[in-house]
Image (cartoon, rainbow, N blue to C red):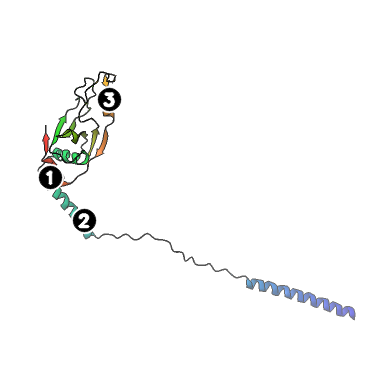
């Protein structure tokens, strides 16, 4: 009798144990939930939208540019391209703008940089020599490239007296050759129309 009761008791304990295990698994499954994905509230910095001009606005801008260009052309129409070029270059590169006269000398290709030096290097191209009427006003020697740029040669406004110990290499004065080698390309500015016209009136072309 005692054995029979013991067997029933053990069986009941086993059944209870199994039921508890199942209940535990069910509870754990219920506890496992999908973690919600948080929405990223961070906003991306966007570039400001550029205003697109209408066709009428674009046409008006173009018309203004054309009108300004025509005014400049009309003002300087009476002068040659060379006269305008001389004035623009002096206004941009001249040592002083307060001059009474702008002397223009055209120097042909093959001319010596220093006419007083028999061994002087020679210009490989035609150049123009601009100078004021006074020594302090300086000078500019350049060749035009015909595309809005010039090559400027750093030759002195007035050559000093030659000394007897001038250095010569390959039959050419070293100093004058260095001046040729140091030429610099410069872009010429359009400049102020009124200033250009005023300076053209002072040009003395040789």
| Side of 30 where 14 appears, left or right | right
Q: Residue at 63%, 72% (x, y): give it.
A: 31
> Could you tell me residue 145's position as x and y percent?
22, 35
In the current view of this chain or complex, which residue is farthest to the left?
78
Q: Which residue is mark 3?
A: 175
Q: Nearer the viewer, mark 1 or mark 3?
A: 3
Give the mark, 2 or 3, whose residue is nearer the N terminus: 2
> Could you tell me residue 130's position as x and y percent?
17, 34
Q: Nearer the viewer, mark 1 or mark 2?
A: 1
What is the quadrant of the N terminus in the image? bottom right
Q: Which residue is mark 1?
A: 76
> Could you tell me residue 133's position as x and y percent?
14, 34
Give the mark, 1 or 3, whose residue is nearer the N terminus: 1
Residues 187 and 64: in front is 187
Q: Which residue is mark 2?
A: 61
Name the secondary structure under disc 3: helix
In the current view of this chain or complex, which residue is farthest to the bottom?
1
| Gap between marks 2 and 3 measured at Cα | 52 Å
What is the quadrant of the C terminus in the image? top left
Q: Which quarter of the figure has residue 108?
A: top left
């Amino acid at each position: 009798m005692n054995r029979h009761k013991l067997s029933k008791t053990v069986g009941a304990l086993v059944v209870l144990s199994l039921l508890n295990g199942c209940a535990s698994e069910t509870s754990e499954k219920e506890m496992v939930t999908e973690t919600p994905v948080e929405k990223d509230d961070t906003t991306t910095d966007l570039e400001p939208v550029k205003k697109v001009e209408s066709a009428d606005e674009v046409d008006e801008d173009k018309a203004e540019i054309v009108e300004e260009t025509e005014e400049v052309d009309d003002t300087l129409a009476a002068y040659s391209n060379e006269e305008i070029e001389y004035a623009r270059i002096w206004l941009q590169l001249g040592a002083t703008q307060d001059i009474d006269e702008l002397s223009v000398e055209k120097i042909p290709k093959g001319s010596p940089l220093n006419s007083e030096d028999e061994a002087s290097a020679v210009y490989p191209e035609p150049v123009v020599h601009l100078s004021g009427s006074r020594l302090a006003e300086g000078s500019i020697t350049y060749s035009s490239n015909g595309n809005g740029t010039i090559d400027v040669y750093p030759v002195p406004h007035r050559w000093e007296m030659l000394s007897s110990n001038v250095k010569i290499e390959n039959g050419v004065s070293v100093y004058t050759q260095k001046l040729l080698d140091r030429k610099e390309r410069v872009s010429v500015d359009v400049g102020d129309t009124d200033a250009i016209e005023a300076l053209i009136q002072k040009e003395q072309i040789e």
